Amino acid sequence: MNGMESTAGAVLESSRPGHAGAAADTGGTRAGPAGPESGPLWDAGRQAPVRIGWDPLDELAVRVGSTLDPAITAQEVVDLVVPGFADHASILLRESVLDGAGSAQPHAGPVRLVRMAFTAWDRELAERLRPAWPVGKVASVPEHSPCAQSMRSHEVIIDTMHSLPGSADGSDVETLLAGRPAVYAPLLAGGRVLGVMVFSRAPARGGFCQAHVASIERLAARAAIWMDNARLHDQLRHTAISMQKAMLPTRLAAPPGLEIAHRYLPGSDMALVGGDWFDVIALSGGRVALVVGDVMGHGAQAASAMGQLRTAVRTLAAVDLPPAEVLAHLDDLMPDIDDSLFATCVYAVYDPATRRCSISRAGHVPPVLVRPDGATEVLHQVAPGLPLGLGGAVGTFRALDVELPEGSLFVLCTDGLLENKARDFDSGLELLRANLAGPDRPLQEICDQVVKELDLTWDRDDIALLISRVCRQPPRDSAAWRLPGEPRQVARCRRLVRETLRAWELDALSETAQLLVSELVTNAIRHAGGEFRLRLRRDARALLCEVCDQTGEPPELLSPSATAEIGRGILLVDELSGTWGHRRTESGKIVWFSIAVP
């Protein structure tokens, strides 16, 4: 591409509007200290409508900065000076400054500039410039061009313009602005060179002069402040968005037996991060934890606490604690995370094999259940508990088991979806229930409708919404038996496993599965007695086997070098299965293992 270069042409120095004086110079004229102005800067020219005596500095604070978007701010600035001062105006920012990694001053050599905005009084000129040097595109200007010289010298340069970086399609840019009187004003803010403003006029209109320099410098200084504010806000915005994306799950794999849809909306465009979060966590035995939480407040402090809480929830979920215990531990952790904040949370564990959901909440919005016939129920019977961080006594958090019918919706959200100053909590709940009608609709459609109808855009908190639909589980993919705690049941369990895997066409896993099931059943009969339960479940990835007994004593894993006989069965499970583990239940424990399906 061609560079933006100065020419050894006429340099316009007359202060009289409409007069084009000439001076021989090989690189343009750097404007020295300005003397008394001969009249308003902004009435120079008679080719376009002019507001005599109008100074755009009077309107800069009113018309510029309506947003903190760099491109919009740049366009507002150039629109301010055309046609009152110039026929064409452009703002160019250094590419490295926009990237946030550039030095304060441009290095020696060509300078890469991004054209942020431009405008031209002449419509034909504007239409020809637009494809020749598109807004948002990068162009390299030579080291000795007026643009580069103005940025390096920190001075306004009055010169003529005879070429611009051309476009890839070969547009003849050189003929568009060639020979026009031009001004190059550096954009300086906080000791950093942001870029340059370029003004030009049609030669017949007259040129720019030294008497204009002071006003141009004031305009460039104001514009630089607005551009720097917009640039910094834009960088903070992208950082905030990246931070929020890193803290919230972006891709939730559909857990067994559930379809998932979710939405997150920050409280405002200015507070792009907040304390709301949601999560879907795979647990042992094909179960899944559904979590929604809300840390008080907005901004980085709330987001930081939210990120730590979400990590803690995942850690506690990996230990397979019951919902009420998870919340109790979070309550203990909250003062260490941030003792000036508190949080609410709802934690639910769903088991697709039984379609039972165990729910516990800490001062949070109650879940909503939508049955297949469309009837909705707010689950107020789930004990509300206290918000996390208020130091509730032992037993503050309690769990409630609820059956989720096939085809039903299980809805978790934060209070930002329901209430604000103009709508109370109960009204929001009723509106939510009304918009959840028709549970057989596509789940994303339901999610979109709920957010659209309940979003309190002008005055609301952050919003987190998690909707789950209970899917039909093929009956052939699971099998379960309740058996008495008698030694002869070991052989029966081996036979049940063998016959079930033959029906599932998983004979390759049968021998290993029979051996490991017999070890777990033997332990259950020997140490727990009473009735036990055996359950098998398969999916495309693995075979899961579970043995539930009536003792809470965890299984003991011996080291391979141990000589004791007790614990050998668990050692076999550890060696031959893909993964294994155990978890407590209300009446005992479940020991499980999985084997990868070939």
Image: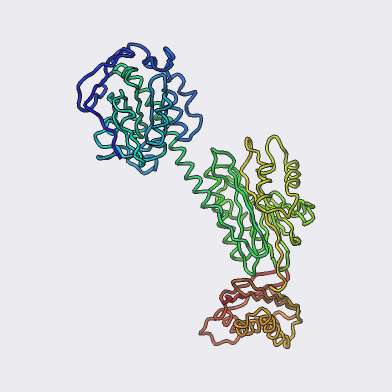
Residue drawn at point x = 75 percent, y = 47 percent: 433
Q: Is residue 169 above or below residue 577?
A: above
Q: Is residue 45 above or below residue 522?
A: above
The answer to whether one can see residue 152 in this image is no
Quarter where residue 261 is shown = bottom right
Residue drawn at point x = 59 percent, y = 87 percent: 565
Residue drawn at point x = 67 percent, y = 73 percent: 537
Would residue 118 appear left or right of 156 to someone viewing this image? right
Quarter where residue 197 is shown = top left
Return the residue nearer the eye: 121 or 314.
121
Return the residue nearer the eye: 405 or 82.
82
Would residue 139 appear left or right of 257 to someone viewing this image? left
Picture coordinates of residue 528, whole percent (x, y): 71, 79
Residue drawn at point x = 57 percent, y = 86 percent: 564
Return the residue nearer the eye: 328 or 3.
3
Q: Is residue 269 above or below residue 123?
A: below
Picture coordinates of residue 559, whole percent (x, y): 53, 81
The answer to whether one can see residue 423 in this image is yes
Colour scheme of the rendered structure: rainbow
Return the residue nearer the eye: 270 or 275.
270
Quarter where residue 351 is shown = bottom right
Position of the N terminus by quadrant: top left
Picture coordinates of residue 194, whole percent (x, y): 36, 35
Q: Is residue 189 above or below residue 348?
A: above
Count the marks: how many? 0
Picture coordinates of residue 134, whole percent (x, y): 40, 37
Would residue 177 appear left or right of 10 to someone viewing this image? right
Position of the C terminus by quadrant: bottom right
